[in-house]
Image (cartoon, rainbow, N blue to C red):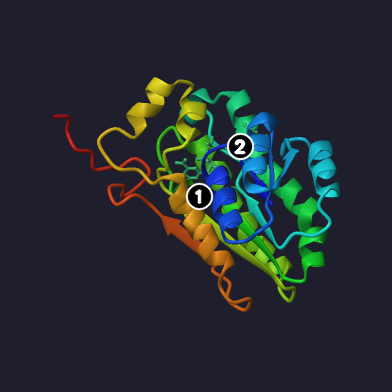
Amino acid sequence: MITGASSGIGEATARRLSTDGYAVVVGARRLDRLEKLASELGGTALHLDVRDSASVDAFAARIPRASVLVNNAGGAFGLEPVAELNEDHWRAMWETNVLGLGLVTRALLPALRASGQGHIVNIGSIAGIEVYKGGAGYTGVKHAVRAISQTLRLELLGEPIRITEIDPGAVETEFSVVRLGSEEAAAKVYEGFQPLVAEDIAECVAWVVSRPPHVNVDQIVVRPLAQATAQLVHRQPHD
Ligand code: NDP
């Protein structure tokens, strides 16, 4: 079960887990993309808007059993400082990254329990472990994802359900196009250094879910070699 599988990390994770033998169920709003992916992988595509509890519940009703839930749907909007916060941006970030992750987890927990050996993989971010100017809307929600991952570990202690958080640095996906609103602005984010690709994160997901059942990998922080912090990146000058 992978949320936000219509592009980027979610799509790469669906491909990777399918290669590893999982029957994948992919959810997102762009159903056309999902259907294409699912037919390629022999999986199931379901419409899902994680911000809408009715959509989440309808989605969960189609999944009686699931051994792995990858809470990946999310993203950032804008880079404005707190003094100029854009209410639509902040509400969208909160509802997608935090409320959405919570609603999906609540709805899918019965299916994870029914599998007898469940695993929840939350895709956080280095924005959940550091802060930067203009980033409070996004760092705030990704810090909340960390708090939820840690709380789940307390609340599900004693059950056969593992909780892992994967916190990537810069990954070249549609993330920056969504955040900044244009391909041009997004291209500048990755200029002069080699960012991670979605498959690098899919590899992390595949590794944590394939550990023996008694092993819980709590957290993986994974960045490009050229990135020390969210905003401190070593860029090669143009030729
Ligand atoms: P993309 O923009 O490529 O993918 C985001 C995915 O989330 C899309 O499939 C989108 O599908 C889905 N999504 C967004 N809103 C909703 C919604 N309301 N309901 C259901 N699905 C939704 O970006 P990434 O692959 O990079 O992002 C995946 C995750 O990784 C996010 O949580 C992001 O915060 C995190 N991350 C990304 C980093 C990066 O540098 N790229 C770094 C650290 C973390 P659709 O629009 O079809 O609904």
Residue identifier under label 1: 128
Residue kind at label 2, given as amino acid type: Ser
Local packing at callout 2 (Cα closer than 10 Å; few below 14, some 14-19, many 20+) is many
Where is residue 101 drawn, in percent x and y? 68, 47
Residue at image coords 57%, 69%:
210
Where is residue 4 drawn, in percent x and y? 63, 41
In the image, the residue with mark 2 has its CB under 8 Å from the nearest atom of ligand 1:
yes
In the image, the residue with mark 1 has its CB under 8 Å from the nearest atom of ligand 1:
no
Q: Nearer the viewer, mark 2 or mark 1?
A: 2
Q: Is residue 118 above or below residue 187?
A: below
Where is residue 228 drawn, in percent x and y? 31, 50
Query: Toward which corner of the image does residue 218 lie, by quadrant?
Result: bottom right
Q: In the image, which disc is placed on residue 6?
A: 2
Residue at image coords 29%, 32%:
191
Q: From the viewer's perspective, is 197 left or right of 112?
A: left
| Residue 78 in sight here | no
For marks 2 and 1, the one nearer the N-term is 2
